[in-house]
Amino acid sequence: MPKKTVLHTENLSIGYKNKKIASVNDFFLEESDFVAVIGINGAGKSTLLNTLTGNLPPIHGDIKINKRSLQKFSLQERAKEISIVLSKTEILTPLTVTEVIALGRQPYTNWIGKLSSLDKEIIKKSLKQLDIEFLQNSYCNQLSDGQLQKVMLARAVAQDTSLIFLDEPTAHLDLYHKIYVLKLLKDLTKKTKKTIVFASHEIDLCLQLCDKIILVKNNQVFLETPENLIKKNHLSELFPENIVKFDKNLKKFTIL
Ligand SMILES: Nc1ncnc2c1ncn2[C@@H]1O[C@H](COP(=O)(O)OP(=O)(O)OP(=O)(O)O)[C@@H](O)[C@H]1O
């Protein structure tokens, strides 16, 4: 059975008031897709993510979520389709893990924010899915970076959206935990059919783990499978060639 398209772009250009950052070749994201957004510093990854999540209006064109124009969604409707996990500075107040995950239910709770038994059940399930039940009463400002990342993911899972966007989910993590978190995210896409899109500088890992890669390069944005990205030499030209080179056979960057 063909997979359902969750997001697609139409003639999209991204950027700011007097500054176009990139034109986007139309692309489609399907359910269960695990997608990295890569590109050098300043290429426009955050600009793209902010546009795809509706936090920055497009300069031109449209984004369709489940075939409906993103611009037509109310804030609450959007929060039922898209969840966003920012980098770690997000939690400044001392909230417990369960309280933070409960924030994910905000789009569904009544105006006083009272959790229903269904909300509570979903919070429990999210704790279980991320394997952090043992942390449920811990304070978030006392967790390690890796643990906190899992809590933020559990909050996004509790929000129960078809799309989850993450900004550099592996920043601040050691190699083991980078791979651990990326595998966990990939696993989530397959178990829950959610589509996960994340910005990353871990190109080698993304090539090994992602279904699709969105490359932001030279004011252009386009989507390819990891295999085609390598085959079409897009990575060979990513960085200036004086210190690092992409080895097509090893499928990774090597130091010159
Ligand atoms: N609010 C803004 N107004 C105008 N220009 C901006 C704004 N935010 C970012 N830019 C510019 O847009 C370009 C792309 O920035 P962006 O943050 O999207 O890149 P990035 O690929 O996420 O970079 P990094 O890997 O360093 O995080 C940069 O030239 C940046 O200076």
Image (spheres, rainbow, N blue to C red):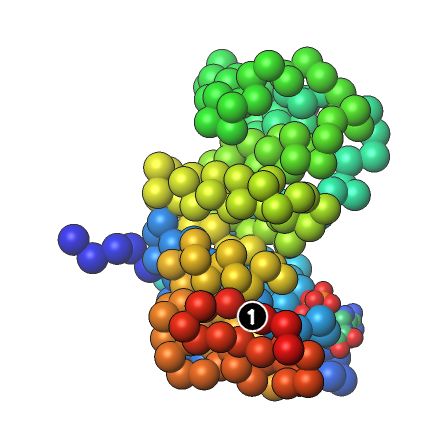
Say if residue 57 shows up in the picture. Answer: no
Say if residue 35 shows up in the picture. Answer: yes
Name the spot of residue 188 as percent of width and height, x first. Answer: 42, 39
**In the image, residue 65 above or below residue 169:** below
**In the image, residue 250 above or below residue 180:** below
Name the spot of residue 44 as percent of width and height, x first. Answer: 66, 73
Which image quarter is the C terminus in? bottom right
Residue 107 image-quadrant placement: top right
Left/right placement of residue 36 relative to residue 151 reads left
Q: Residue at x 43, y 45 (%)?
A: 186
The answer to which of 47 and 133 lies nearer the viewer is 133
Q: Residue at x 67, y 44 (%)?
A: 173
Name the spot of residue 135 as percent of width and height, x first. Answer: 64, 18
What is the crowding at mark 1: few (fewer than 14 residues within 10 Å), some, or many (at least 20)?
A: some
Q: Which residue is mark 1?
A: 253
The answer to which of 32 and 17 lies nearer the viewer is 32
The total number of labels drawn is 1
Q: Residue at x 46, y 62 (%)?
A: 207
Ligand 1 quarter of the rendering: bottom right
Q: Residue at x 38, y 59 (%)?
A: 211
**In the image, residue 204 above or below residue 99:** below
